[in-house]
């Protein structure tokens, strides 16, 4: 906590090089990564729903013939 307060009060933050615009939150690279993450979440939801509607055979309990 003390180091952070000293960092601000001594204005050491002025000597830090800013992040390149290529890696900024509004850059094309970061927007693309965000879109891919959102797409992967939608795919996971769709797979979950599809498995609920049409469960695969591996999740079903084995069916034993009546004797």
Image: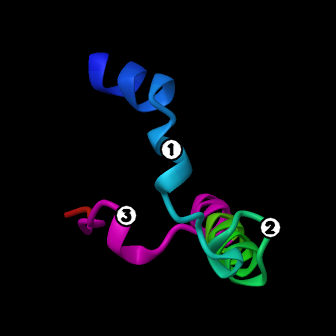
List the residue tagged with mark 3: 60
In screen coordinates, is 43 left or right of 13? right
Question: For the point 71% across and 63% down, which residue is it?
Answer: 25
Name the quadrant containing residue 29. Answer: bottom right
Question: For the point 57% across and 66% down, which residue is it?
Answer: 51
Q: Upstream in the sequence, badge 3 or badge 2?
A: 2
| Viewer-nearest residue: 39 or 52 | 39
For disc 1, the neighbor class at 10 Å (few under 14, some 14 to 19, many from 20) is few
| Dominant secondary structure of the residues highlighted in magenta in the image | helix
Would you place residue 59 above or below residue 10 in this image?
A: below
List the residue tagged with mark 2: 26
Question: For the point 47% across and 74% down, which residue is it?
Answer: 56
Residue 41: give its label: none
Q: Upstream in the sequence, badge 3 or badge 1?
A: 1
List the residue tagged with mark 1: 13
| Viewer-nearest residue: 41 or 22 | 22
For disc 3, the neighbor class at 10 Å (few under 14, some 14 to 19, many from 20) is few
- The residue range painted magenta reads 43-65
Q: Upstream in the sequence, badge 2 or badge 1?
A: 1
CB atoms at circles 3 and 2 under 8 Å apart?
Answer: no
- Where, quadrant-wise, is the C terminus in this rendering? bottom left
Viewer-nearest of discs 2 and 1? 1
């Amino acid at each position: 906590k003390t180091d952070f307060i000293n960092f601000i009060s001594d204005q050491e933050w002025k000597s830090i090089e800013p992040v390149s615009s290529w890696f900024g939150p509004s850059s094309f690279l970061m927007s693309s990564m965000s879109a891919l993450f959102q797409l992967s979440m939608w795919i996971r939801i769709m797979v979950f729903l599809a498995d609920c509607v049409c469960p695969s055979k591996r999740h079903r309990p084995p069916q034993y013939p009546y004797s």
